[in-house]
Amino acid sequence: MQKNRNNIYEEAKKVFIDTNSPKEYVKFESNIRYLQHLHEFYNSDQKISVLIGKPGIGKSMLLKRFVYENPNPKLILYDKPFFKKYELEKQLAKDLLGQNTKNFIEEIENNLEDFEYTVILDEVQLYDDYMLEFVRIASDTKKIKFILSLHEIDNESALTKEHFTSRIFSYITIKNPSLPELFVYFQKKLLSSNLYELSESLKKRDLQFIYQFTQGNLRDTNKFLYTLFDILSYYNEHKPSVLKSLKIPKKFLEMSAIHLGYINA
């Protein structure tokens, strides 16, 4: 169904508001691969998998989508970091054992089946070595598997030590989407909201203009596209004669880049 021309840019703007809903996850070639790696680990008898990638690249949404595709109460995602070992241990005891315990490791060894739970910890770059050592010990029981997501691994981190690396099944490095993937992302986002007309409003060369600033970082790209459609919405309401067709003139891309500080006016 065709959208009312009067609000089409306003509708498009809303599409690029950052969302936490795994239902709205947009798949393209590389993130399909990342999901496959997570599925392989989930179905293996391995202890730890590590997910690495820069902020805004889509790690958290990837993890939410993975959990969404595997609805199982024994697959647990903690998307907010813990800052103390006892906080993490207390939450795990509650979720895995149903009660607090004085000796968590002993209790899971006595009460859980092998690899019964898979626990995902996001923002692990905020965990100190003491907490990481607890994760290693818990994984050694073979009752819990861990997926650890973080921005990068510091050379001094416990994650780099041999007694830890020997337990890691895989390192999944999340990279920025390529330009062709970003074009797929743009089109799928608009098509999912029935904005068919606008899905062709930007060509690959237009996305290349955006890509030179955002490098495909999804958070930054969403911000750019939100700004672009916000400006277009304003012109559509106050100066509609400037918009002679749904094809977006380059000057609006440049205006968005100036507004976001990528270009000096």
Image (cartoon, rainbow, N blue to C red):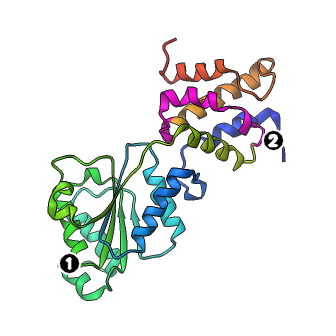
Dot 1 amino acid type: Ile
Q: Main secondary structure of the magenta part?
A: helix
Residue beneath the point at 44% across and 53% down: 60
- The residues tagged by marks 1 and 2 sit, at their Cα atoms, a distance apart of 57 Å
Q: Is residue 17 something that shows in the picture?
A: no
Image coords of residue 185 (percent x, y): 60, 44
Tag shown at residue 3? 2
Q: Is residue 28 above or below residue 222?
A: below
Pick the residue in front: 54 or 122: 54
| Stretch in magenta | 196-220
Pick the residue in front: 135 or 28: 28
Q: In the rendered image, which quarter is residue 12 located in?
A: top right
Label 1, on which residue? 105
Residue beneath the point at 55% across and 58% down: 22
Residue beneath the point at 15% across and 64% down: 163
Would you say residue 205 sits in the magenta stretch? yes
